[in-house]
Image (tube, grey):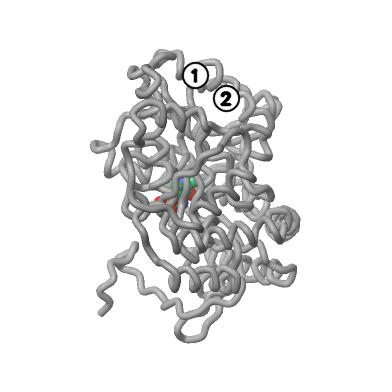
Amino acid sequence: MSHVFPRHTKSDLPVAAGGDGCYLIDADGRRYLDCGDAAVSCLGHSNPAVIRAVQRQVEQIAFAHTGFMTSEPAEALADLLVAHAPGDLDRVYFVSGGSEATEAAIKLARQYYLEIGQPERRHVIARRQSYHGNTLGALSAGGNAWRRAQFAPMLIEMTHIAPCYEYAEKTKGESSFDYGQRVANELEAEILRLGPDSVMAFMAEPVVGATLGAVPAVEGYFTRIREICDQYGVLLILDEVMCGMGRTGRLFACDHDGIAPDILCIAKGLGAGYQPIGAMLCTDQIFEAIRDGSGFFQHGHTYIGHPVATAAALAVVRELTERDLPERAGVMGQKLQSALEDAFGQHPNVGDIRGKGLFRGIELVADRETKTPFDPSRGVAGKIKKAAMAEGLICYPMSGTRDGRLGDHILLAPPFIIEDAQIDELITRLSKAITSVI
Ligand code: PMP
């Protein structure tokens, strides 16, 4: 009997025993094309540079608490991230994962307003159909109804506006641009409703991942969001935990939108799975308010800035930037999109194929014309996940995320080193899996 408490307590999982590029290998020697371990393994599973960096760091010094000492890899990684980061994001606060990054962002926003003498600012506005993590603050910010449901009485009060979800919510006759402006303006309406002096932050994913399946905003949406935040002195927190670190074809997803947030959260691809690590980047304005005020960000975890985790991430970011891997993700992502459209574009149960770079989503529907989702009791996405595993494909189907009408999606997030032949393999295996279920 296994004593591990797994996510799905009734599941019987294969044992991960090895990795080879884009493939995970189980203890029986079966190879799985990894196209969706939650968008983590951007470099595949056997990157020699990252493995060596981890080995070297463990041998040199594995741990020193950041309350007492900094470390060479943490300093170098912060320098490298800042050199590539958009806007004035000049300070990096390391954490161990995505939820810790978003949680820290919420607390940083609150402390910033306390430091500058605006204690009445306490509201966070986020979006429905979003996911920002599973700790209670991050879960409060997320608008994923299914993930929130059982913990609702324990969540912090935050309000949610519409996401930018063109496929499902743009009205007939409305242009994409007008739709984007309309939903962005919901932020202004919500700020006014709550009282402009009481709102501290707006949080959003530039490309929605784990709730909608790779949904980018339409052009102009984030420009308008940035404008509204500036007008009302509301901090813009972008959650790029899933879509950041090159996955969309640029190192940071917001680079596509030509805007920069006040706080940026990253994780997943930052450590590429070689170490658990996340980070929160913020502007000097925020940092200086704390430095010149209380002098202490009242937050922290034992493992922030962990030397081995930062050494791994430093090697990852060097690989990404020196080998132009985000650009490669952009090119291969276009090929993946075309291959998905060729294979599934006419499928009666495929409503939409979308995304950016190597971050792609397929929305499954019971009826293409009306965009009606499958009945959740059918558990379509879960069955496809299982069928795909049986075909030797790891993808990330999601269901149960409906807020009234949203249904089943398959998220695809392969490593940036994926080759043409592996895209063909992905399509073949996914077709078999989908056909066996619907
Ligand atoms: N934000 C986003 C956008 C995510 O996709 C996730 C994870 N799926 C998180 C936050 C939470 O990250 P973690 O699971 O590392 O805590």
Q: Quadrant of the C terminus?
A: bottom right
Asked if 166 appears above or below 394 in the picture, the reply is above
Residue type (three-letter) at the residue carrying disc 2: Ala
Asked if 166 appears above or below 77 in the picture, the reply is above
Front-lying residue, 419 or 201: 201
Q: Quadrant of the N terminus?
A: bottom left
- Is residue 50 visible to the viewer in this orientation of the structure? yes
| SS category of the residue bearing label 1 | loop
Q: Residue at x 67, y 55 (%)?
A: 321
The residue at which mark 2 appears reads as 184
Q: Is residue 297 left or right of residue 73?
A: left
Mark identifier at residue 85: none
Between disc 2 and disc 1, whose residue precedes?
Answer: 2
Q: Quadrant of residue 427?
A: bottom right
- Badge 2: few (under 14), some or many (20 or more) residues near its Cα, within 10 Å? many
Residue type (three-letter) at the residue carrying disc 1: Gly
Asked if 358 appears above or below 146 in the picture, the reply is below
Find residue 81 and report its horizontal and vertical position in percent: 58, 48
The residue at which mark 1 appears reads as 233
Q: Residue at x 43, y 29 (%)?
A: 160
Residue furthest out toward the bottom: 28
- CA gap, disc 2 and disc 1: 16 Å
